[in-house]
Amino acid sequence: MSDADATVVLDNVCKIYAGRRVVSDLSYALHPGQVVALVGHNGAGKTTQIKMMLGLTRPDGGRLSVLGADPGHGRGARRALGYLPESVQFHLAFTGRETLAFYARLKGLPASGHDALFARVGLAEAADRAVRTYSKGMRQRLGLAQALLGSPRLLLLDEPTSGLDPALRRELYGIVADLARQGATVLLSSHALTELEGHAERVIVINRGRKIADGTLDELRALAGLPSRLNCVLDGAPQLVELSQSEKPAVLRGLLDRGATRITLEDPSLDDIYAHFLKREAA
Ligand SMILES: Nc1ncnc2c1ncn2[C@@H]1O[C@H](COP(=O)(O)OP(=O)(O)OP(=O)(O)O)[C@@H](O)[C@H]1O
């Protein structure tokens, strides 16, 4: 895929706060139909990248293009953006419907006619209740609904699953997958690789404002090259063998031929892989 059809292009982007580089020489492109996760510890620079894409703060170096435009300028591109901030704050006295009407007006969209959106995020029954009566999960659903207003071509979700129960988390990823199927680009930030399995086709790992890995989870697994752990019982004695991914088939066959029993194989977890990249960076 070329940068010409990219939704977002970062080319050596830097951001400096109070003399400190919090985003450093960052380059990547995001394309239509992709669900991409920005993964990094607290303070890694994930929100800063999202804010630059929204035009809320400007890069101090490099080039940033969002939907073909400089995000600091032009209302047109902003209308095609959806944003769910890390902590959603709504006016508690407004109903859900009034809240969406308010955000729709800000985006220059019709203030009414959002029933389908309420249904999509599971708030059809609660649309006319005051936000004050919503649970945290319901507020997060409302946040997602406001991000989805106007069928955005680029959806920026800042830690959208923090504080969500597993059912709601699954629903959110379901909505994200639908949007991507319809051609939207979805960028979500996260602290953890583990929950992204099956949900993000590409992961960009950020450490101290720098990109330290970028690929599918399978590519990151291969890149990390961490061994799997094999436990078995051989000749009555328990055995633990560490083996690379390429050694696995031959070693397994050999153990079976020698009559090994109780064979269990533990592949490196996504947490192990994440820790590996961070450790490599610190070395
Ligand atoms: N407006 C600001 N002024 C000064 N420093 C800032 C500002 N905004 C962010 N920073 C600093 O920039 C760095 C990156 O912050 P950022 O919020 O982008 O990280 P993050 O990866 O989103 O973290 P978290 O996971 O905790 O949300 C942090 O060290 C933060 O303290």
Image (cartoon, helix red, strand yellow):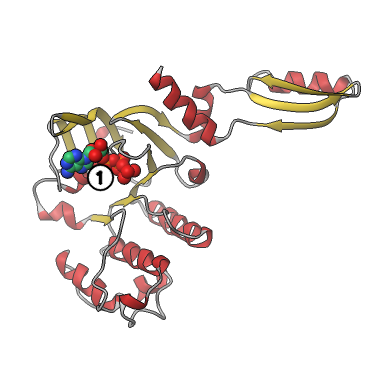
The residue shown at (49%, 23%) is 223
Measuring from the top left, give residue 93's x and y in whole percent.
25, 78
Seen in the image, is 193 located left or right of residue 89? right
Measuring from the top left, give residue 162's x and y in whole percent.
41, 53
Q: Which residue is mark 1?
A: 50
Label 1 neighbourhood size at 10 Å, few (<14), some (14-19), many (20+)? many
Q: Find numbered disc 1 in the image and state the secondary structure of the residue it sits on.
A: helix
Q: Amino acid at mark 1?
A: Ile
Residue lying at the far left of the rendered structure: 73
Measuring from the top left, give residue 184's x and y in whole percent.
33, 51
Seen in the image, is 74 located left or right of residue 90? left
Image quadrant assignment for residue 192: top left
Seen in the image, is 9 located left or right of residue 269? left
Image quadrant assignment for residue 48: top left
The residue shown at (28%, 77%) is 97
Confirm or reject: label 1 Cβ below 8 Å from ligand 1: yes
Image quadrant assignment for residue 17: top left
| Residue 237 appears in view | yes
